[in-house]
């Protein structure tokens, strides 16, 4: 019988200019307490983001998204 455990999720979005109300979806975080499951999948469409904001800090954005992935995976190294 399939499990009926409820999963929760959030979509990660990059919003280069909040006043223009434009964004690029960059990933998802999935959580299920009964299964003790937490994971994040990240996939940034750099071309789409640069089309919205050619001056965006791609490396900084990628670093922040990688930090979310590392926290979810439990692999974030502390300084």
Image (cartoon, helix red, strand yellow):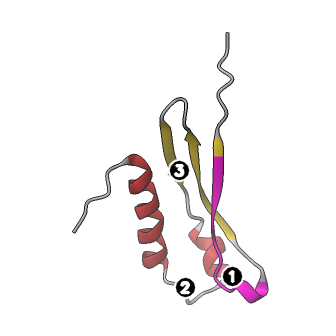
Residue segment shown in magenta: 9-20
Q: Is residue 10 magenta?
A: yes
Q: Are marks 1 and 2 in contact (CB under 8 Å)?
A: yes
Mark 1 lies on residue: 52
Left or right: where 43 falls relative to 4? left
Q: Are marks 3 and 1 in contact (CB under 8 Å)?
A: no
Mark 3 or 1, closer to the camera: 3
Mark 3 is surrounded, within 10 Å at the Cα level, by few (under 14), some (14 to 19) or many (20 or more) other residues, namely some
Residue at the (44%, 50%) spot, across then down: 72
Residue 74 x %, y %:
35, 49
Kindly state the secondary structure of the residue where label 1 is placed: helix
Q: Is residue 56 magenta?
A: no
Q: Considering only order in the chain, which callout, 1 or 3, is on the residue closer to the N terminus?
A: 3
Mark 2 lies on residue: 56
Mark 1 is surrounded, within 10 Å at the Cα level, by few (under 14), some (14 to 19) or many (20 or more) other residues, namely some
Left or right: where 77 falls relative to 25? left
Kindly state the secondary structure of the residue where label 2 is placed: loop
Give me the disc on residue 41. Answer: 3
């Amino acid at each position: 019988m399939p499990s009926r455990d409820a999963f929760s999720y959030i979509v990660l979005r990059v919003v280069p200019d909040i006043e223009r109300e434009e964004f690029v979806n960059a990933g998802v975080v999935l959580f299920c307490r009964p299964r003790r499951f937490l994971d994040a999948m990240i996939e940034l469409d750099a071309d789409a983001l640069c089309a919205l904001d050619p001056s965006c800090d791609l490396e900084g954005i990628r670093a922040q998204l990688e930090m979310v992935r590392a926290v979810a995976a439990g692999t974030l190294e502390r300084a």
